[in-house]
Image (tube, rainbow, N blue to C red):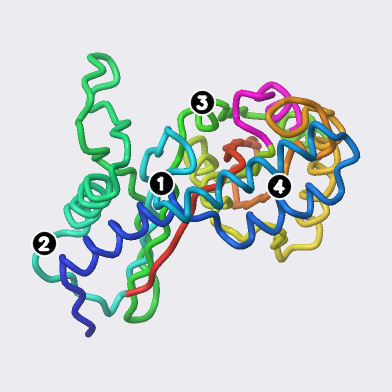
Amino acid sequence: MKIVHFHQIRDAIAELCQRANFELNADVRAALETGAERETTPLAKNTLLRILKNADVAKERSLPMCQDTGLAVVFADVGQDVHIEGGVLRDAIDAGVRKGCKEGFLRASVTGDPIQRKNTGDNTPAVIHTAMVPGNQLRLQLLAKGGGCENMSRFKMLTPADGREGIVNFVVEAAELAGPNACPPIVVGVGIGGSFEYSAVLAKKSLLRKIGERNPLPHIAELEEEILRRVNASGIGPQGYGGETTALAVHIEIAACHVASLPVSVNIECHAHRHQEATL
């Protein structure tokens, strides 16, 4: 049995909140640099270079890459041999978000009631997805999810008869409808199968994969490549100014589903794709 203390989780989450907002991940940077090298449209190339420069300044000065510092979405894989001492997991994660946002001067972007719209003032509560896994470690993966890209999410309950073609058309349509609103170049997360709600979790979880890391199933990897080609052929380009780099990647996760159903969810990330992780 491994003991993980409340304050360890709190401090880890606080650090992840700040790193996600201040530091562009290496895989995202590499994808943006590749896009800038390949772009043949001068405005698109210049836009990508400006995005990279903005990220450099953010890291150098410990400033957010974007004024929208995001909703904290945490995937927590809890080893079955882990015991959390000093409090419960949810409280520790929220304490970490509160601490990280206060110390990093990150904008408070959470409203406690979706109707009354009163800001909670500290970016809590976080959205938390917990899974029990083998082992004695606690893995914390955090996404700082901005409103602009999150608002471009879409869900559709296709019929099995719609098949592969229906999936491709729906995902491409979702990316095209997002247009400049999701701050492209985007990362497109797709969840196929499961149930109504689980397909959305799959779409979000797919975003945790490194850029360029394909689904291990060959037919799904092929689907990712096809959708990526179609999205980049749209001509939307970086920040909607036109060009060949509308998306950096398409990530798909799948799950078993009812024989009568084909649920598909699309969750989009902006060009900053703010995600970090820690293992305790």
Residue at label 3? 151
- Dominant secondary-structure state across the stretch colored magenta: helix
Q: Which is more N-terminal, label 1 or label 2?
A: 1
Q: Which is more N-terminal, label 1 or label 3?
A: 1
Residue at label 2? 87
From mark 2 to mark 1, how far is it between C-alphas? 31 Å
- Please, what secondary structure does the residue beneath circle 4 have? strand
From mark 1 to mark 4, how far is it between C-alphas? 28 Å
Q: Position of residue 32 (x, y in %)?
A: 71, 50
**Outermost residue, right side:** 40
Q: Position of residue 100 (x, y in %)?
A: 26, 51
Residue at label 1? 63
Q: Position of residue 88 (x, y in %)?
A: 15, 59
- Please, what secondary structure does the residue beneath circle 1 have? loop
- Please, what secondary structure does the residue beneath circle 2 have? loop
**Outermost residue, top side:** 116
From mark 4 to mark 3, how far is it between C-alphas? 18 Å
Q: Tell me which segment is drawn in magenta.
A: 172-184
> Was residue 140 drawn as part of the magenta stretch in this picture?
no
Of tags 3 and 1, the one toward the viewer is 1
Of tags 2 and 1, the one toward the viewer is 1
Amino acid identity at mark 3: Asn
Check disc 2: other Cα within 10 Å, few if <14, some if 14-19, many if 20+: few
